[in-house]
Amino acid sequence: MVALVHTVSLAVLSLTSVAALQSSSKPKLRVNVERKVDNLQAKMAEMEEEIETLTDQVSNLASPTSKIHSTDSLCTVSSPDGLFGATLGYGGSYHAGWSGEEDKARSIDVTWKKDGKTIRIECADSETNTSGMVEKSAKEIERAFSKIIPFADVLNKIKQGFKSDMSESKCRELVAEVPGYGSINKFLDDNIAEVLKLIAEQEGEVKTL
């Protein structure tokens, strides 16, 4: 990606030089070239933001403060940014959970039962002292909560991760592909209130902690 940004930078410099050489003789061409330069500079700014975001995510996962724990039925990665865990349960059940590292009372948990045919969502928000839970068919849950969690995709990744013996490297790969990777606290900030609202709309249980 860095090489790509460097290439775009050279292109911007080249177009700028062309604009300077032709500015006196061809005003219309100069305007067109300047417009292209502006577009390239805007794209460069977007690319730089994307690179910064990816760099932060990689740094969080590769940070010495990140802790990875894996067994045949468990994969967890914790860091100052938060904690994600996936587990393989009995009878074809799977679980995925997001929580704050310092405040584990802020969490979103998903459990797939009967090999994914039923989904249970639990959510707790220590800031509003509220928790909620709903359990319905996978189709109903996916329809209501799909904007927050791509259930089928996450379940498939967890299944693949536990197909053979889970390892630290496989656990790392699994975590890197789930929603909220690299920014779990932000994922919770952005979604806890909406999850609790949707649980209530789906006639689930919402109560004070």
Image (tube, rainbow, N blue to C red):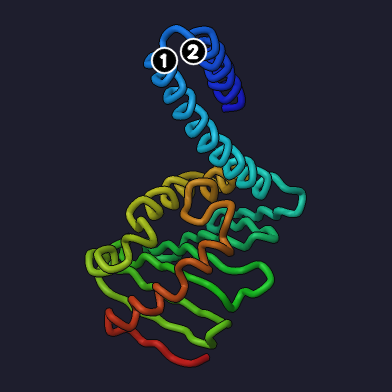
Q: Which mark is residue 108?
A: none
From the viewer's side, name the closer residue of 86 and 142.
142
Q: Secondary structure at mark 1?
A: helix
When asked about the image quadrant of residue 104, the answer is: bottom right
Residue positioned 52% across, 29% down in the render = 41
**Amino acid type at mark 2:** Ser
Task: Mark 2 and mark 1 in contact? Answer it, CB < 8 Å.
Answer: yes
Above/below status of 15 relative to 35: above
What count of labels does the image hold? 2
Q: Quadrant of the N terminus?
A: top right
Above/below status of 31 relative to 95: above
Q: Which residue is mark 1?
A: 27
Above/below status of 145 relative to 36: below
Residue positioned 56% across, 60% down in the render = 184
- Going by the picture, which residue comes out furthest to the bottom? 208
Q: Which mark is residue 23?
A: 2
**Residue 115 pos. (x, y %):** 32, 60
From the viewer's side, name the closer residue of 66 and 11.
11
Q: Is residue 32 left or right of residue 20?
A: left
Q: Residues within 10 Å of mark 1 (few under 14, many from 20)?
A: few
Q: Residues within 10 Å of mark 2 (few under 14, many from 20)?
A: some
Q: Is residue 184 left or right of residue 193?
A: right
Residue positioned 58% across, 64% down in the render = 185
